[in-house]
Image (cartoon, rainbow, N blue to C red):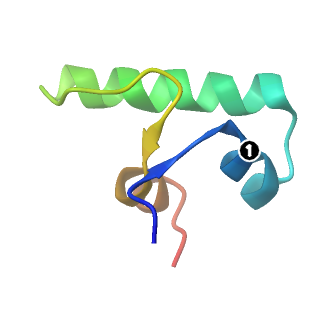
Amino acid sequence: MKDFYRKEDLMKILDISENTAYKIIRELNAELKEQGYKTICGRLHRKYFDKRYRIN
């Protein structure tokens, strides 16, 4: 299983557009940065996304 999601993953999981997927990645990565975590542009940590969107 991947540790990070990319825009394609979010588009498929949430059935959203590419722009919306990028927006979600930016927003959640900003939250992680505020908490002191390092982030990777264009990628989102899977566990954090799953927690925030109640996936599982």
Q: x, y percentage for residue 26?
A: 52, 21
| Quadrant in the rendering for residue 6 | top right
- Badge 1 local density, few (<14 within 10 Å), some, or many (20+)? some
Residue 9: percent from left, percent from top: 68, 51
Q: Judge by depth and name the residue closer to the eye, 18 or 23.
A: 18
As displayed, is residue 5 above or below residue 33?
below
Residue 29: horizontal and vertical position, in percent?
39, 27
Quarter of the image where the N terminus is located: bottom left
Residue drawn 80% across the image and 56% down it: 12
Which quarter of the picture shows residue 23?
A: top right
Identify which residue is drawn at 24% across, 22% down: 33
Circle 1 SS class: helix
Q: Residue furthest bottom?
A: 56
- Does residue 18 appear left or right of residue 44 in this picture? right
| Amino acid of disc 1 | Glu
Q: Is residue 8 above or below residue 27?
A: below
Instruction: Give how far across and how far down residue 41 sits, in percent.
Output: 45, 20
Q: What residue is at 60 percent from the left and 31 percent from the top?
A: 24
Write down the residue under mark 1. 8
